Image: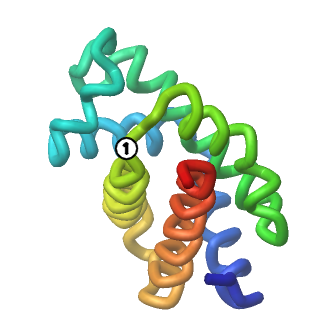
Amino acid sequence: MTLTDNDKAHVKSIWAHVCSHPEEFGAEALYRMFVAYPTSKTYFPHYDMHAGSEQIRAHGKKVVTALSDAVAHLDNIGGALAKLSDLHAQKLRVDPVNFRYLAQCLLVTIAAHCRGQLTPEILVSLDKFLTLCGKILTSKYR
């Protein structure tokens, strides 16, 4: 899967808003994932799982910051996410399905906050981007 020039422009346009609020978007998406997919909590047994907890906010910020780096390198997303891919595959051993869960929850979070900006075309491009990021993050599992 590759991103077209239009996809890249769409992702950059919506991500400008997301990356200006990394803790807010990241924490909300993580919290949604933990509620909707409770098995995803197994990787965070030491976290306070309440909405807005400092641990969820801090990790949410890390997630959005990593994705922001990928957005900044849309022509080399694999390079931008290489260390993170190694970490998740070799050390953390996160079940790959969790990347899709998080992508879904991030899309819902963005939709809730960017209603007027999230056109169907931007949504499709953003979904393609997040799917591609998930594939890259799981590429080291093989």
Residue lying at the far top in this picture: please name it.
Answer: 46
| Quarter-of-image position of residue 65 | top right
- Identify the residue at image location x=42%, y=88%: 120
Q: Position of residue 115 (x, y in %)?
A: 38, 71
Relative depth, front residue between 20 and 72: 72
Judged from this view, the residue extending furthest toward the front is 142
Residue holding disc 1: 95
- Residue 107, located in which quarter of the rendered image? bottom left
Q: Quadrant of the C terminus?
A: bottom right
Left or right: 34 as drawn, with respect to 57:
left
As helix, strand or loop, the secondary structure at mark 1 comes to loop
Q: Quadrant of residue 94?
A: top left
Q: Residue at 73% x, 38% y: name it.
A: 83
Which one is nearer the viewer's eye here, 53 or 30? 30
Q: What amino acid is labelled 1 in the image? A: Asp
User: Measured along the vertical axis of the image, is residue 34 above or below residue 127?
Assistant: above
Category of crowding for the residue at label 1, using alpha-carbon neighbours closer than 10 angstroms: few (below 14), some (14–19), many (at least 20): some
